Image: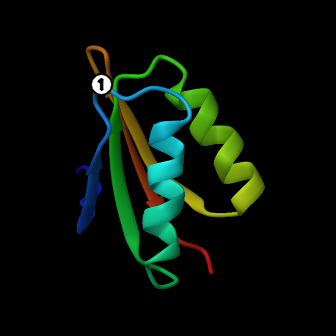
């Protein structure tokens, strides 16, 4: 069963660094424990998300791919 996030960001058509900047900005407005979903067709998105999460400490709950579109579900850690 896929993880469902109450807050979603559509970054399809946007490229590095915009998707990660939008995730960062959205997480800043959220409370600890809240969940965010982001979709992107940027080929660099998986590497960018991994790097961002390693630096920020937020938790990746799910990731998948549908064709060229990546989906990430992230829980804010603090």
Left or right, 27 with reference to 47: left
* Vertical comparison of 30 with 22: above or below: below
User: Residue 50 sits in which quadrant?
Assistant: top right
Residue 34 x, y percent position in the rendering: 41, 77
Residue 4 picture location, percent across and down: 24, 60
Residue beneath disc 1? 13
Q: Position of residue 5 (x, y in %)?
A: 27, 63
Q: Under tag 1, what secondary structure?
A: loop
Whether residue 10 sits left or right of residue 31 in the image: it is left
Which of the pair 3/8 is nearer the observer? 8
**Label 1 Cα neighbours within 10 Å, binned few <14 / some 14-19 / many ≥20:** few
Q: Establish if 32 lies above or below 15.
A: below
Residue at the extreme right of the image, as rendered = 55
Looking at the image, which residue is at 38% across and 68% down?
35
Please name the residue shown 29% across and 56% down the image. 3
Q: Position of residue 33 (x, y in %)?
A: 48, 80
> Extreme bottom residue here?
31
Measured along the vertical axis of the image, is residue 44 above or below residue 38?
above
Query: Which residue: 53% across, 49% down?
Result: 21
Which one is nearer the viewer's eye here, 28 or 1? Answer: 28
Colour setup of the view: rainbow
Is residue 20 depicted above or below 61 in this figure?
above
How many numbered discs?
Answer: 1
Q: Quadrant of the C terminus?
A: bottom right
């Amino acid at each position: 069963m896929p993880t469902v996030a109450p807050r979603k960001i559509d970054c399809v058509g946007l490229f590095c660094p915009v998707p990660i900047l939008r995730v960062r900005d959205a997480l800043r407005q959220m409370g600890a424990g809240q969940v965010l979903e982001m979709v992107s067709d940027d080929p660099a998105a998986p590497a960018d998300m991994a790097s961002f999460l390693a630096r920020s400490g937020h938790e990746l709950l799910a990731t998948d791919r549908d064709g060229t579109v990546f989906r990430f579900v992230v829980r804010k850690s603090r």
